[in-house]
Image (cartoon, rainbow, N blue to C red):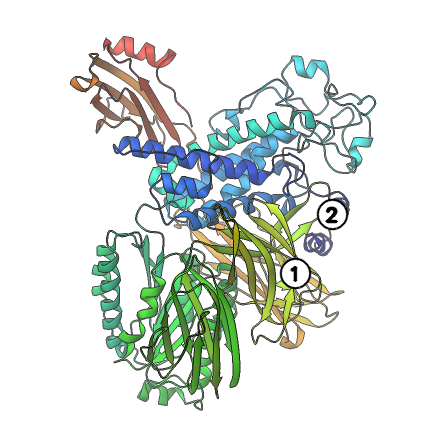
Amino acid sequence: MTHLCDFARLMMSPGLAIACLLLLLTGSKGFKVLPSDNSSTHQDITNKAILQTTAQVCKDLASVEGRDFTLPPGPLTAETVALACSSFGSTLIFQTFIKQISLNNVEIDLIHAFSGEYHFDNEMFVKGRKLITDGMTSVKASIKQGNFVAARQRLGNILHTLQDFYSHSNWIELGNISPLSDLIRSDVPNIGPLADKDTPTCQNCVGGVCQNNILENIIRDKKLTSGYFGIFKPKGKCSHGGFLDSTSLQKPTGGINKDASGSIHGYLHAKAAEVAGAATRELLQDIRGAAGDRDFLRMMGIYTNGTSVLCFVIDTSSSMTEDIDAVRKMISFIIDSKRGTADQLSAYILVPFKDSGFGPLIRITDPDEFKAHINTLTANGGGAFPKMCLSGLQLALTGAPPSSEIFVFTDAPPKDLDLLGTVTALIERTKSVVTFMLTGSLSFSRRRRSVQSQGLNGRVAASDSQVYLDLAQASGGLAIQTTKTELSQATGIIVDSSSSPLVTILHAVRSSGSADRLSFVVDESVRNLTAYFTGRSLSFTVTSPSGVSQSNAAVNGPLGMIETVGNFHRLQLKSQAGLWEISVSSTLAFTLKVVGQSPIDFRYDFVEVNQGPHSSYAVLQSRAQAGVNGTLLVTIMGSDFVRLTEVTLVETSGSVVVTGTVESVGNKDYLVTMDQVPAGEFFVSLKGESIKVTPRAGTNSFQRQSSTRFRTSTVMVTALAEGVLEPGTPFSIPFTVTTNDTAGSLTIRASNDRGFSSSFPSTLALVTGGANGTVTLTAPPNTPSGKDVTLTIEAESPGATDTNYAVLRLSVVSMVTDVNRPVCEVLSVKANCSKNCSLSTWELSANLTDGDGTGIERITLRQGNGTLNTDTAVDTSGVSVTMATYSASCCSPVLELVAVDVVGNVGTCYKSINRGHTVAHSSHLSFIMFLTVTLVLSS
């Protein structure tokens, strides 16, 4: 919250600064973020609705495809839903994506704390609904373009606003027990009678009791109102409420919020939370209709054909012929060996580059199609001169899902070193692991060669290859040096990475030669234990928990196999639970990484916490501040029977360890407080206990470590983007920078992964330790709606001693004028169903139209496993009409059709017949039935 207050001060907004002071005292508003008593939080409501909706989608899809669907008894969890959806490897990704949506939900309480429309405060119903409907348009467009990260981000944001309506308005006090569906419909002119600005809505609470403080005429006339939050409110209006809400002390006193059981209208909290959950499911169902079941499940992380994604960034210059051949063979092996197994990959991503350009990013889900595409790659032009490697890597980092494995193949230094800061920032934000496969006679210790010498010898100079080493270490990857003829032997690490779920147990980096003894704990869930070394002139000995040792000289020893290629050593160890030790002696720098397959993993983020009656937090989009206290949000994933016991920050050399205070906040989440975040570079390491649910209760320790290294900074960058980019229209993103320096100039850099036109100040003069500026970004007029762009703003301190950044993912959305849903008209229903339903069938025919809208793009079955046929023609008035005919066994008596137009408006038709009855409706009779009973249209 201090960063937001700095933003208010530097942007010279006195109203925002006053409100910021108020929030520092009072905390955020809306359903609670951190759990207390028995109240439902925004996370609770969101998580439950996602689980319920995802389970329903999988159930409907199974019914349409004629498959069984069974949910195990008990409360829904990510594990049980993924299992029921036959997505056995999706649990970790499903949990991760639910968490992303939830975090994007709760951040609204910080980044838009004083904007009433984001919370339906101050009777801002029109603007609040527009936020929701505009957001839904953006989510649908993003999904259509396959930009699921942007879709989840915006979805979480609008769910917060939607849920707050039921807590902050008087919808529940009016006696409603179901959602206000018009909140998510753009085609409805208004959402009902609203109390105008001059109409009193509340009376004083009496004796601290506020159950009847909304005026009787407001209740009688069913008028909507909401509480005011801030410093002042109009005469006669309701307040939000709460003992630190200053407006609640102004007449009429009290308030009407239902944020928690202890809130001023807390007696209605449970009802408000229940209806908010139903509203969340309703919105998710609309998004599902527009996206289609498969893409909706992909957005949520439920995959039917594998979960892992492999991403390749490949130099296609003429000197890379042998490398590309090795990649082809490796990819062919991975695809063929994993075909039809649980380890089959969900997607493959390729970004080519050379000296003269880079891209485009190609994402392919079909393995044979990707194999065919790789076979068309040719090496030509450029040789071993500097290449656009970092530009290609930037595309991969923004185009691949977070926490992806990215492999870069090159034999030349980067020519686009100006992107080094941007790429480093993206690695830290996405937590993707980047491994470089560097070919040629490489050595990090060699003296720098000239560019001409590099071109003749095909070698990367020391300082050039150091860029790759630094990026690999920052991401938790490796920089593997080998000759072109030996490259195929080194690609075993890619085969390992294609198995899921892979977790990091230990990651150690030593920048100079040393003798070291490293230990790590392997728990019983770990399989395929593997250790990787990169470095030359090193020797090591591995000791198992049972005391058995094996040195690097024993290629095939009692603990496993050791392969050595160039500077890369791969140890395939026999998994054994307990404490392992590795003794290393090296005269040069080296890296050690220990990984294994396990369902138990974690995710972490530095968050900004606002403590108060309604505590909240938001994920930092920059480096954490050094020298002050800091908070990590840690989520344990993959098992309901583990608990976190210790979290430490481990300096990359291993010499500094900072231990945090761990507090469980529910839903497998822990807030970890560091009294002082030190300066430098660190990994996050954690320990915990797995609680065995057996007659012989016991515990089993586990250890995990972050792959990505993070840095702290004394420069803080805050950027806030309101809304979306519209093609061809300049879009402004204001940002602020604060630092310990009191004078001098900051160096500013801004880049985006789409190459959109941008402008920004190259320097900013510090004024009392801070400065503010604006980046202006313009998407080309022909940019497809739903594309996203990742903007990185970097700020470098005076003297270039420190740097930080802000990373924002922005959506490009074209203005939508078509807000009407497709319309369905039933022409006939014929059913002659006997008591033995398997011996008879029923039929339905209907016309579907989109009037003068954008046109129907897709018609699918949501319920029913019969046969659907469609045919499109233009009627005499020039309107496109789609004729749908459906036939099914009488054993499948329910039909639900979903019609979606080009911009994502959704209409559904529902029909149910009674088994054992004969039905034969004419067009006229069917149309009457459509109007009154059997067909339901919803957006």
**Of residues 429 and 211, the one drawn nearer to the viewer in this rendering:** 211
**Of residues 158 and 549, the one drawn nearer to the viewer in this rendering:** 549
Q: Residue at x 70, y 29 (%)?
A: 227
Q: Residue 20: which disc?
A: 2
Q: Using a 10 Å C-alpha cutoff, classify the residue at mark 2 as few (fewer than 14 neighbours), some (14 to 19) or many (20 or more).
A: many
SS of the residue under disc 1: loop
Would you say residue 149 is visible in this rendering? yes
The quadrant of the rendering that contains the C terminus is top left
In the rendered image, the residue lying farthest to the left is: 839
Residue that numbered label 1 is attached to: 660
x and y percentages locating residue 385 in the rendered image: 35, 81
x and y percentages locating residue 529 in the rendered image: 39, 66
SS of the residue under disc 2: helix
Q: Considering only order in the chain, which callout, 1 or 2, is on the residue closer to the N terminus?
A: 2
Left or right of residue 15: residue 397? left
Q: Using a 10 Å C-alpha cutoff, classify the residue at mark 1 as few (fewer than 14 neighbours), some (14 to 19) or many (20 or more).
A: many
x and y percentages locating residue 692 in the rendered image: 49, 49
**Of residues 821 and 763, the one drawn nearer to the viewer in this rendering:** 821
Left or right of residue 687: residue 235? right
| Three-letter residue code for mark 1 | Gly
Residue 468, picture quadrant:
bottom left
